[in-house]
Amino acid sequence: MSSIIKQFYFDKELKKRIQKFKIAEGEDEELFYSETKEWKSYKENKKRERVLKNSNLPSHVKNLTLDNYVGNDTEKITKLKRYLDKFEVKFNEVHLYFWSHENGTQKTTTAGIIAKELLLSGYSVNFILMGKLLKDLSEEKFDKTLTPLIDKYRTCDFLVIDDAFDKKKATIYKSGFQIPFLDEFLRQRLEIERKATCFSSNFSIEEIDQEVFGKSMKNLIKRSIKDPFQFISSYELRNDFNPNDLWS
């Protein structure tokens, strides 16, 4: 054993000893150290845990990829893999809209996986419920500068807004005083900053309640989202997506 390089690391939480390096013999009988697969995997898991915690992503997506998607709608997943692969050069200004009338169709999980993969690739990412976003925006003073929290939501490279446009999952007062804040925020992010945003919703874009969220906001989403993705069911899926130039 070498006294120069510490070969093992003990994780107190896991109560487990991790081998960091293995020794191999090179030319002229010279010994050299190389990282073990166990240590590389351990470091990758720790990185995932750290970045997920800092970005509020659902914890269950930590070890998931798009290949874990359940269902036979493989063309949808192929398009989303391309979205990830070409994000820097083609899709960093392209917004996504995942919707389904049903719960449990993996739309939130899929959005979380995309966010996680971008996060691990070095992009700034955040995940927030629309109800929480409304609350944070309504507490914003909108004076000279935005608070760091709102500015983070506004300028991060990829933002997931979950439970979008569901009046049952957000506190919206009769006066609707919060809606102009949301409208202004989305216009700034989608059209001015042009930062990629992913909405997950139980409603199609056409079903966004104009009486609650306003006609102008509905129109903003319609012109910003080129191809909404409908999630049919976890176990019985079909492909209703019409290919277009966006994905070519």
Image (spheres, helix red, strand yellow):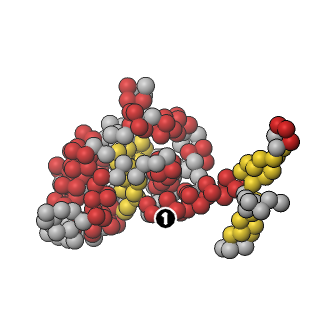
Which residue: 86% across, 42% down? 29
Which residue: 50% across, 60% down? 52
- Percent position (x, y) of residue 21? 75, 54
Secondary structure category for the residue under label 1: helix
Seen as rendered, the residue at the extreme right is 29
Quadrant that contains the N terminus: bottom right
Is 229 left, or right, of 234 in this rendering? left
- Percent position (x, y) of residue 244? 39, 27
- Percent position (x, y) of residue 142? 15, 64
Residue 92 placement: quadrant: top left
- Percent position (x, y) of residue 151? 27, 59
State the residue in front, 197 or 195.
195
Which residue: 40% across, 58% down? 127
Using the image, determine if residue 224 lies above or below residue 184: above
Q: How many marks?
A: 1
Residue behind mark 1: 53
Quadrant that contains the C terminus: top left
Residue 144 placement: quadrant: bottom left
Badge 1 crowding class, 10 Å Cα cut-off, few under 14, some 14 to 19, many 20 or more, is few
Question: In this orientation, does residue 85 appear?
Answer: yes
Q: Amino acid at mark 1?
A: Lys
Using the image, determine if residue 167 lies above or below residue 97: below
Using the image, determine if residue 86 lies above or below residue 121: above
Is 189 left, or right, of 116 in this rendering? left
Which residue: 31% across, 58% down? 153
State the residue in front, 61 or 207.
61
Question: In this orientation, does residue 240 appear?
Answer: no
